[in-house]
Image (cartoon, helix red, strand yellow):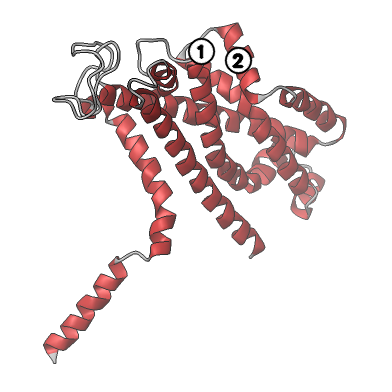
Amino acid sequence: MADTAGQKLAARAGAGLRLSPGAALTALPWMVTALFVLAALLAPWLAPHDPVTGRAAPMQQMFSDGHLLGTDALGRDTLSRLLHGLRPMLVVSLGAVALALAAGGAYGLVSGTAGGRTDWAMMRAVDILMSFPLILAAILVLAALGPSLLNVTLAVAVSQLPIFARLARALAAGEAARDYVLAARAAGFPEWHVMLREVAPNIARPLLVQATSVVALAALTAAALSYLGLGVRPPAPDLGYMVKEGQELLFIAPEQALLPGLLIAVFALAVSFCGDQLADAERRGGAA
């Protein structure tokens, strides 16, 4: 009897540890995103060779001795360059979204809470910025500042800023009409107190959910800028520029273009799915 009870208990424990197919599928994009972040952070230790200096024979095929993914036209290890190329993409996408969230969120908070002519004037400025395609706005910023990792981050942030400004304005305008905000104003609290203590905490969560989805767009924008030669300066590895370099070798060594392009696409899709899951959870929470 004791053995039977123990076996049942062990079976229940094992069943609890096993993920259902739905739960595993839900966790997959988060695991992929975490894998990208870890690979970027550990790139100096994971990369088998120097990503900048080419000491091997050029154009070695995949699974060559000492070079799992081969080498490029200058004899640089492809795997090492891919690992190090993750860093600029993650720095730009995450940094740009953080800047755009802070600046755009604050801008929209002021606009939506103030209302009236102030709101109208501030939103017309956002409309002007949104009239430019995102990539064109980023290119204009880089044309003024020059290409570098910091400037690319700023350029992508400027291109994403209207997304957060408009969302924050809509959320803040809705909160500004609620009774608790009207009561705070009637009690004589200053406007900055109403914005920071009453309105801001109630619009922060939807903005953070939106930020997760925008990371994918920022990563694609950063890759496009690098492809155009406006990203990290060669010979430093960058996935977008690696696609451009590999394009010239597409019929000889297609992996030189396909592998960095695949990494960009997988990261963007994984982060996008993470954002969709958070948005669904936010909608369910709001409905409840």
Say above or below: 215 vs 171. above
Of mark 1 and mark 2, the one earlier in the sequence is 2
Q: Secondary structure at mark 1?
A: loop
Callout 1 amino acid: Leu
Position of residue 230 in the picture relative to residue 114 (left or right): left
Provide the residue designation for mark 2: 139
Say above or below: 23 vs 216. below
Residue at (19, 13) in percent of width and height: 57
Q: Quadrant of residue 287?
A: bottom right
Q: Quadrant of residue 26?
A: bottom left
Disc assigned to residue 164? none
Residue at (55, 27) in percent of width and height: 99
Residue 52 percent coordinates (x, y): 28, 13
Residue at (51, 13) in percent of width and height: 230
Disc assigned to residue 230? 1
Q: Determine whether label 1 and label 2 are within 8 Å by CB.
A: yes
Say above or below: 142 vs 185. above
